[in-house]
Amino acid sequence: MIELEGVSVTYGAGPTLVRAAREVSFRIPAGDALGLVGESGSGKSTVLRAVAGLIPHAEGRVVINGRELSNRRPRESRKIIQMVFQDPYGSLHPNHTVDQTLSAPIAIHRLGNAESRIMAALTEVGLGREHRYRYPHQLSGGQRQRVAIARALILEPKVLLLDEPTSALDVSVQAEILNLLTRLRRDHGLTMLMVSHDLAVIAHICDRIGVMHSGRILEMTTAAALAEGRVTDPYSQQLLRANQGFDASGVVIDVAA
């Protein structure tokens, strides 16, 4: 469903040149979930935005559902790829109600049955009719992120891009959102690409995990291998120590053992 080949992103020139992503390549079969982990500035969010078409000067090949996409994306390709951002308050228009937020993509893509689509999307993410005409400031952080997920789902995408979707939430709410995303992936057959600095969070959803540093993928592994400390790259080992060990259920383990 997703194929990247030699994707690179640079900013600036000369002495101020920054290579945010360097020759990044991977494949994600339909229905699978791949996570990218690394410290801030490792390039993981840059790769996500390149897949979304939000970086017009990205180089390399991005293929979605068998179709190579250029930097100028047609409306149909934008429909099948949707993104959920890190900060739900920042990604929602403060002066738009939930109804307006969910109505906008329906109008932009000229879809019908707006009423049924909006109610179905709210139900999918665990919100009710009472939330429909509230503004973002009238919602909790978890509810705002559910609205952001509903906005992505309302176009019935094949690919969901997740940019640290739980890092701005309380720990208890994080678990709810992760469980929601896991269910949505199963029910809708979604292909997911997720970035995070938290290994336990990303292991909850993703089958495979790529460790990024300085714009490169250093190692591609699995959640089970990470949890058991079976990584070979020195940076991956350091990242495990920084996370103090983890397993997919959130129970801390000793990776030094």
Image (cartoon, rainbow, N blue to C red):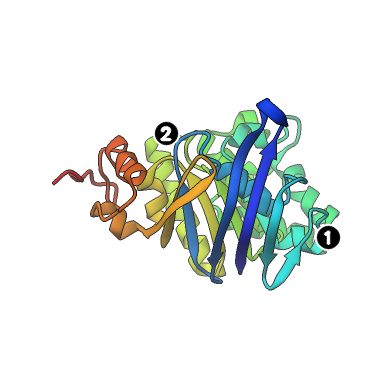
Q: Position of residue 138 (x, y in %)?
A: 61, 30
Q: Quadrant of the N terminus?
A: bottom right
In the depicted structure, whether residue 154 falls above or below residue 245: below
Residue under the image location 49 percent in, 33 percent down: 40
Q: Secondary structure at mark 1?
A: loop
Q: Which residue is mark 2?
A: 170
Q: Is residue 201 left or right of residue 191?
A: left
x then y, percent, for residue 248? 31, 53
Give residue 70's position: percent from left, percent from top: 79, 58
Q: Amino acid at mark 2?
A: Asp
On screen, residue 208 versus residue 107, left or right, reads left
Q: Quadrant of residue 116?
A: bottom right
**In the displayed image of the protein, which residue is found farthest to the front?**
14
Q: What label sits on residue 181 in the rendered view?
A: none
Element under label 2? Answer: loop
Residue contact between numbered discs 1 and 2, judged by CB atoms under 8 Å: no
Outermost residue toward the top? 15
Left or right: residue 182 compared with residue 143: left
Residue 236 lies, in percent from the top left, at: 35, 46
The answer to whether residue 233 is left or right of residue 11 is: left
Can residue 84 be seen in the rendering of this structure?
no
Figure check: 221 above or below 244: below
Q: Residues within 10 Å of mark 1 (few under 14, many from 20)?
A: few
Name the residue beneath numbered marker 1: 74
Is tag 1's residue or tag 2's residue first in the polypeptide sequence? 1
Observer-nearest residue: 103 or 196?
196
Q: Nearer the viewer, residue 249 or 29?
A: 29
Residue 131 visible in rendering: yes
Residue appearing at x 42%, y 61% in the figure: 208
Name which residue type carries label 1. Pro
Circle 2 residues within 10 Å: few <14, some 14–19, many ≥20:
few
